């Protein structure tokens, strides 16, 4: 039974070159570009003894026939240095070996992108020069590269494909710099992901909620056209039960007449002092006493029940707003009752 390989092309090349005659290996290396030589060199410096079955499978896959020594195939890093020297000269081989040993060049550039989603991958590519996109995609699995490329406009797709097809790999130092930029973007994206979506949505809702002159509705409408689900999430967060303190007193009293006293009592179980004051301020003394009594009689209740009661009151606010009535003052603004002509 053939051994199933789970090796990259670079790993297979490294195994094959390690066991070939130095003269043959040198001739093969002459056909490699500098980036490929660096990648193979890096792989060989990390390689331990390789089992015969793996070697057989590699050679079989590459359609090469050679006699293998028994047991384990041992590779000699010093021997490979001599092969490099013969293939590309002492000075250049010394530079490559030094770079590999110091970790200057990654064996597989952009390998960290394997762990990011397609959406995150696209955010990293957007805004980059087509040549940079072509370089990065040339190190991506063909199937995934196709998926990513399909997300670009048609004109950009053809441009990137042409660049990939005619791409001459830049110097190692430039690939390293591009890789470092990508790594920095991945870290930035990671920090962005750590901010919970609800927190980001809440921040957006607070910004929109502070807009004057009906602009907030226009902004929400524009967002809704592009992303209805996001618009709905933001709308839910634009007004919460804690924001009841911003409801104008006249509108507040109308809302209280639409909500059952038991619902009000339940909603106030977790209300902060400011919200509670706002409620009782807009009730008659008799109704206020009734609400307090009902709240005391409720006993311990599930938080979800309390939140449901609060949501009923928030929905009453939205219904009144939908009728075109002036309901909520802008946060941080004045209710208007203290305004006067000057």
Image (spheres, grey):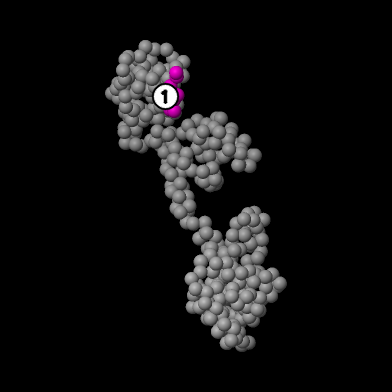
Please tell me in which quadrant of the rendered image residue 6 appears. Answer: top left
State the residue in front, 216 or 97. 216
Please tell me in which quadrant of the rendered image residue 310 appears. Answer: bottom right
Please tell me in which quadrant of the rendered image residue 244 appears. Answer: bottom right
Residue 41 position, x and y percent, is 36, 28
Residue 5 is inside the magenta segment: yes
Range of residues picked out in magenta: 1-7
Looking at the picture, does residue 51 appear above or below residue 246?
Answer: above
Quadrant including the C terminus: bottom right
Which secondary structure, mark 1? helix
Residue projecting furthest to the right: 323
State the residue in front, 282 or 204. 282
- The residue depicted at 58 percent of the width and 35 percent of the height is 146
Residue 33: in sight, yes or no? no
- The residue depicted at 36 percent of the width and 16 percent of the height is 20
Question: Would residue 311 appear left or right of 180 to someone viewing this image?
Answer: right
- The residue depicted at 52 percent of the width and 56 percent of the height is 197
Looking at the picture, does residue 286 appear above or below residue 139?
Answer: below
Residue 239 position, x and y percent, is 58, 68
Residue 283 position, x and y percent, is 59, 83
Residue 309 is inside the magenta segment: no
Identify the residue position indicated by label 1 in the image: 12
State the residue in front, 127 or 62. 62
């Amino acid at each position: 039974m053939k051994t199933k390989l789970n090796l990259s092309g670079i790993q297979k090349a490294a195994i094959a070159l390690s066991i070939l005659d130095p003269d043959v290996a040198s001739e093969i290396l002459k056909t490699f570009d500098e980036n490929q030589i660096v990648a193979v060199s890096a792989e060989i410096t990390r390689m331990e003894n390789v089992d015969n079955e793996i070697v057989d499978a590699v050679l079989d896959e590459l359609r090469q026939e050679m006699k293998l020594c028994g047991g384990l195939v041992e590779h000699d890093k010093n021997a490979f240095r001599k092969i490099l020297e013969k293939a590309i000269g002492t000075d250049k081989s010394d530079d490559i070996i030094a770079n590999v040993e110091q970790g200057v060049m990654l064996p597989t550039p952009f390998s960290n992108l394997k762990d990011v989603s397609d959406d995150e991958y696209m955010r990293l590519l957007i805004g980059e020069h087509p040549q940079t996109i072509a370089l990065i995609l040339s190190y991506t699995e063909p199937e995934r590269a196709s998926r990513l490329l399909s997300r670009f406009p048609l004109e950009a797709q053809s441009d990137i494909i042409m660049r990939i097809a005619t791409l001459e790999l830049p110097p190692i130092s430039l690939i390293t710099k591009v890789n470092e930029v990508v790594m920095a973007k991945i870290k930035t994206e990671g920090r962005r992901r750590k901010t919970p979506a609800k927190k980001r949505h809440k921040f957006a809702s607070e910004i929109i909620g502070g807009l004057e002159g009906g602009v907030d509705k226009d902004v929400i409408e524009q967002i809704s056209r592009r992303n209805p689900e996001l618009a709905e999430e933001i709308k839910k967060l634009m007004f919460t039960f804690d924001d009841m303190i911003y409801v104008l007193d006249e509108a507040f009293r109308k809302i209280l007449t639409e909500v059952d006293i038991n619902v009000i009592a339940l909603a106030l179980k977790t209300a902060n002092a400011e919200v509670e004051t706002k409620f009782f301020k807009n009730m008659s003394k008799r109704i206020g006493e009734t609400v307090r009594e009902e709240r005391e009689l409720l006993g311990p209740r599930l938080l979800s029940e309390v939140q449901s009661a609060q949501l009923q009151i928030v929905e009453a606010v939205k219904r009144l707003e939908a009728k075109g009535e002036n309901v909520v003052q802008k946060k941080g603004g004045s209710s208007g009752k203290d305004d006067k002509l000057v």
